[in-house]
Image (cartoon, grey):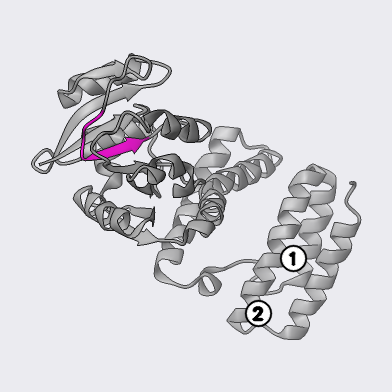
Amino acid sequence: MISVSIIGVGRVGGALALALPRDRYFIKDLVYRSSDAMAVDIAAASDTSVSSFVDMGDLDADVVFIATRDAEIASVSNSLVSKLPGKPFVFHTSGALSSKELVDLAAVGCKTGSIHPLVSVSSPELGPERFRGAYFCIEGEADALDQARQITNALGGIPFSVETDKKTLYHAAAVTACGHLVALFDAAVEMMTKCGLSEEDSKKVLLPLVKSTVQNLGEQNTAAALTGTFARADIETFVRHLQVLNTSVSDELLEIYLLLGERSLELAAKQGISAEKIERLRAKVSIAKSKLKW
C-alpha cells in the first residue's frame, strides 16, 4: 500500500484524493492552504484527516502531491525541506511549471517530478470519471517518472512525457486547444448574435458544428479535417465575409478571423488546393490585416 499526502485540496488535489484506488493507495494527509471548506468535504469523502498548512507536522508518506496554485509551489517546496524525513516522491500538478520548481526538495534527496492531467476538472467529484482515459503529462527525474507512470495508470490515465525545458510550451499548446477554443467559440457566438439570434440560441446552433469538427479531428489529420471557405481557398466567399465583417463586428473579431484564415490556408495547401488560389487569397488576407486599426 502506497501512502499519499496531498497539499492543496482544490479541484485537482481533491480529485486525486477521490480517484486514487483504495486497494493500492492510502490517503494519509490532506493539507489545505487557504480555505478548509472543500478540504473538509474531501476528507469526509475519502475518510482522511485534514489540517492547515500552518499547523502541518512532518509528512512521512511515500508520495507527496503539491496541488496548490502555481505561484505557491516553490515556497511550499522550500517549506517542506525539513518536513519530509523519508525523502519521498514529490510531484506538483501544474501544467505550466516543470519539476525545477521543486529544486529545494531534490537537493535534499527527494525524487521530484510533475504530473499534469490534460483534462478539464471543474470539481473534485468529477476526477474519478475525467481521469479515466485522459492523457497525463509527466516529467522529472527518471525514478520519479517511473512512479508517475504507475500513478497515472492507476488513475486510468495515459502517461506521456515531455522534456523539462519544454513544459511551459506544452502548457501553452494545451491552453490553445482548450481555453482558446472556448474563446474562439465565444467570438463565433458574438458574430451569430449579429444575425439576430440570442446568445443562447447562437450557442445551440453552433455547438453541433463544433462537435462534428472535433469528431473529424479524432478520425483525420488536421489538414483533412479542415472544411469551409479557407479549405477551398474560396476567394469570392472570403470577400463577402470581409465586407460584412468590416461593418458588423469589432476589429478584434475581424483580426481573429483573418489570423486563423492564414493558418487555415497552410492546412489547405496540405490538402492539395491550388497554390495559385491559395496565394491569391493569402494576399487578400494580408491586405485586410494591414487595414485594421492598431
Badge 2: few (under 14), some or many (20 or more) residues near its Cα, within 10 Å?
A: some
Residue that appears at 81% across and 65% down: 285
- Taking 193 as reference, is 26 left or right? left
**Figure quadrant of residue 34:** top left
Q: Which residue is more in the foreground, 276 or 72? A: 72
The amino acid beneath tag 1 is: Thr
Residue that appears at 19% across and 50% down: 154
Query: What element does badge 1 sit on?
Result: helix
The amino acid beneath tag 2 is: Ala
Q: To which residue does mark 2 refer? A: 269
Query: What element does badge 2 sit on?
Result: helix
Q: Which residue is more in the foreground, 213 or 173? A: 173
Q: Specify start and end residues of the magenta stretch as a single range.
A: 59-66
Determine whether 55 is above or below 95 in the image.
above
**Figure quadrant of residue 16:** top left
Q: Quadrant of the N terminus?
A: top left
Point out residue 261 in the picture as x, y percentages from the top left corner: 70, 63
- Taking 69 as reference, is 234 left or right? right
Point out residue 148 in the picture as x, y percentages from the top left corner: 29, 52
| Dot 2 or dot 1, earlier in sequence | 1
Is mark 2 in CB contact (under 8 Å) with mark 1? no
Q: To which residue does mark 1 refer? A: 237
Determine whether 130 is above or below 239 in the image.
above
